[in-house]
Image (cartoon, coloured by chain):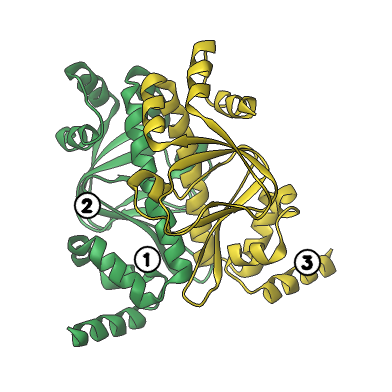
Chain colours: A yellow, B green
Amino acid sequence: MIDVLFNHIQDKVSLTAADKETIQSFFTPKKLRKRQYLLQEGQVCKHLSFVAKGLLRTYNVDEKGLEHMSVFGWEGWWISDFNSFLSGDPAIFNIDAIEDSELLLISYDDYENLTLRVPIMDRYFRMLYQNSIVTKERRLMSSITHTAQEKYLKLAESNPEILERIPQNMIASYLGIAPETLSRIRKNLVAKK
Amino acid sequence: MIDVLFNHIQDKVSLTAADKETIQSFFTPKKLRKRQYLLQEGQVCKHLSFVAKGLLRTYNVDEKGLEHMSVFGWEGWWISDFNSFLSGDPAIFNIDAIEDSELLLISYDDYENLTLRVPIMDRYFRMLYQNSIVTKERRLMSSITHTAQEKYLKLAESNPEILERIPQNMIASYLGIAPETLSRIRKNLVAKK
């Protein structure tokens, strides 16, 4: 399982055998069954979790009981309520497993210690976060400027295989549209083909 | 001007005199007059710019000619079309000055070289991007779950002094609402006091 993490890190920076040993010592493996929670709103998010296998979602629930999907995480993604993880404030997100999943967890103190012990990890996370910012900027502008159909098309283009693994009602919530609207969009797209 | 940057960096990490000398050698100062462009949509964003003084905005223009505000940057902020800066793709954002501004610019190659020459800068940018991700996540969830009035209140609470410096029509665009809606919200809030 740790090799999935090493591969992900080595896509961005080089690791020595000693680095790997140190990195491994900071992580704890955890398995989640489908529908099991990793984090509930109001708890403090004590770990940054690397997804070695499976699929999870981050979402919150508004006062009317409606779910608002924030992020999906699959193999090679990091998942957390990042604000809660960094600040120690209560999480505003829930995280649960859409599929049986295998994770590698690191606590906040260990995350800070890891970057001191293996400084190249600062570089890895710096690059990881750069990409995350670009993705979030695109999604934010898309939420303001694009129609639901355009948003769906962009998602389908960038992550076709993941889209197959996520239930339709969660995709609708991610796009901020009603499930019926998504269903209509999908029918229109099929009709056009 | 460079001291504003050093102070900002030293809020997060320690710098030696030699680090400072190296850092300074990588940056070029630039002054912008009010309304002057730093970047236009379609150009490649060749620099990451640190705002030492003034106020700028990042925005794009849709097919109907409507401006959509993305980010405001003032003293102590970094501003760019980050995707264009990292990838070399054409920028989707425009950046211009709301006030006379003083910037420190670094090119992509120099940014990469700087982190190799002064590795603690990886740590600085890692921390900077962490905060940026938290801000963007909050704004994204806010855009999905909050009313215009709630969004305005959050903005007014977190950045009261900056809000005074930004024209109302740009704030309305940032919130994704019509200027008339913002005007009505402000009147309601004053009436409630």
How many C-alpha atoms fall within 10 Å of the one at disc 1: few (<14), some, or many (≥20)?
Answer: many
Q: Are marks 2 and 1 in contact (CB under 8 Å)?
A: no
Q: Amino acid at mark 3?
A: Leu
Spatial distance from mark 2 to mark 1, Cα to Cα?
22 Å
Going by the numbered disc 1, the residue's amino acid type is Tyr
Task: Point out residue B72 in the picture as x, y percentages from the top left corner.
Answer: 31, 56
Q: Please name the residue that numbered disc 2 is placed on.
A: B33
Image quadrant where residue B188 sits? bottom left
Q: What kind of element bears circle 3?
A: helix
Pointer 3 residue = A189
Q: Residues within 10 Å of mark 3 (few under 14, many from 20)?
A: few
Q: Residues within 10 Å of mark 2 (few under 14, many from 20)?
A: some
Q: Position of residue A166 (x, y in %)?
A: 70, 56
Front-most of residues B132 and B95:
B132
Q: Quadrant of residue A152?
A: bottom right
In which quadrant of the rendered view does residue B179 lie? bottom left
